Image: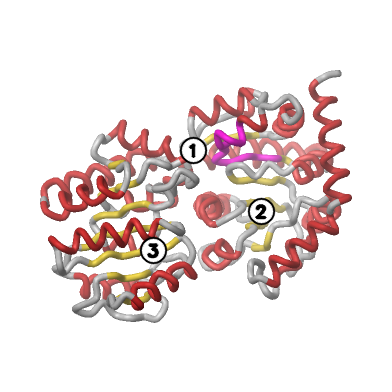
Amino acid sequence: MAASSRGMVVYRVYRALTRALSPLIRIHFKWRFFHGREHPTRWAERLGRPSVRRPSGELVWFHAVSLGEGMAAIPVIKRCVDCRPDLNILMTTATLSAFEVIKNQLPSSVLYQFSPLDVPAVVDAFLDYWKPNAIILMESELWPNLVMSSSQRGISLTLLNARVSTKSFMLWSEPILLPLISLMLSKFSLIVPLSNLQAIRFQLLQAPPFVINFSGDLKYAVGYDSSKVGIHSIEELKVELACRPVWMASSIHRGEEEVVLRVHKVVMQKFPDLITIVVPRYPKHGLEIAQELLKGGQHVALRSQHQRIKPGINVYVVDTLGELKHMYRLTPIAVIGGSFFPHLAGHNISEAAAAGCAVLTGCHIGHFSHMVQEMQRLKPLSVMQVSGEYDLTNALMELLSDVKVLEERQMAAKQAFDALSSGIITNVWNLLNFHVYRTYLLYKKVSI
């Protein structure tokens, strides 16, 4: 049996299973709704029920699962709006955190919905209503029903900033799944991997070589931010932090706050006026951290409560969404969380580098390892990896004690970011314009 035939067999099994399990999937979805994990009024969009009318004309659909991928898509969407104002743009994400942040950063002309579940009836209803001419998926959003149903309708498919984690690559390479993955990848007009390693992985998963094109990692483009939102309050914080030693632990996950606060306690012995800015991955976690600190008799200020950093306060907890880029402007040192425990996989370091911070991270950084390697290759001092609590403490002591060392690392991080971010959006736009907008959409018009 040919590989494509085997892939179709596996897909039919998947489609049958998702159709049969759709009642259970919907029950699970309702469980998420009742536990506050879905939007209280727009949850029906996840079931393929639109909340706005589709405008007439051609429509391009951008989809990203969560906040990081969605933020990487925004600069591309803005370029598309500028260069092709005749096209309608629809963006979807799956998570509440992405919705809360991204809704205020998209151009006003862009339609924004929650993404459909990968259930046959839901996907079909979504596609039949929106009738996208092209779909641009971010990173690793390879859902069989979505990909195959779109291809059957003649919709152009693009995978942007494409990546496959090591775990997924090993799973997808298995004899049972490889035919399905290969079949799905054959439906794409364009695959833009975020690194050379990722390009090799897609080739090993049997993606057609001619659709793979490299442009650079869009996560670097996230570092650019011309927004003026929140600038006034940031300037006020700068005044409050003036003349005090400052460092920030950003995007920390549960358990990492214990590492951060132990390090904070040790460093404070040498720098009693120290301010540690803690930015948890999820705002609710920030409130929990503040409550624990208060129980321990420590003074803490909460961002969500607009509390000021008064003398005697040594910990500032940022329990809000969408402000991380602005927060990096407050600190000369940024420690990127999600990297201190083996089950974690790191977070984007480019935002801190773009702001001119000295960048530190743990060792468990997943697919962000290529970003660290690229920056260190250009500027060895641009990113410092620490093995744990002891190394982090020593690194902070050195950076806070030696202005020259700190400035060298700040400059190296900014220079590496500037070099790697240059021209990425233009490169991506040129690929989309050639492979999708000009070639595919123009061809469809002519054929009609």
Identified at 26% across, 57% down, the residue is 263
Q: Please state which amino acid type lies under the numbered disc 1.
A: Asn
Q: Is mark 2 on a helix, strand or loop?
A: loop
Viewer-side residue, 300 vs 237? 300
Earlier sequence position, callout 1 versus callout 3? 3
Earlier sequence position, callout 2 versus callout 1? 2
Reading the image, the residue beneath label 3 is 279
Frontmost of labels 3 and 2 is: 3
Few, some or many C-alpha atoms within 10 Å of disc 1 (few <14, some 14-19, many ≥20)? some
Asked if residue 425 shows in the view, the reply is no
Q: What stretch is highlighted in magenta?
A: 157-169
Quadrant holding the N terminus: top right
Reading the image, the residue beneath label 2 is 87
Identified at 49% across, 28% down, the residue is 196
Provide residue 189's location: percent of width, then percent of height.
68, 34
Q: Please state which amino acid type lies under the numbered disc 3.
A: Val
Viewer-side residue, 387 vs 79? 387
Q: Please tell me whether residue 26 is drawn above or below residue 381 in the rendered image.
A: below
Reading the image, the residue beneath label 1 is 427
Is 389 displayed left or right of 42 in the figure? Answer: left
Is 413 displayed left or right of 83 in the figure? Answer: left
Q: Please tell me whether residue 379 is drawn above or below residue 85 in the rendered image.
A: above
Q: Please state which amino acid type lies under the numbered disc 2.
A: Leu
Quadrant holding the C terminus: top right
Provide residue 273's location: percent of width, then percent of height.
16, 69
Q: Please tell me whether residue 94 is drawn above or below residue 230 in the rendered image.
A: above
Earlier sequence position, callout 3 versus callout 2? 2
| Label 1 – label 3 distance at C-alpha | 33 Å
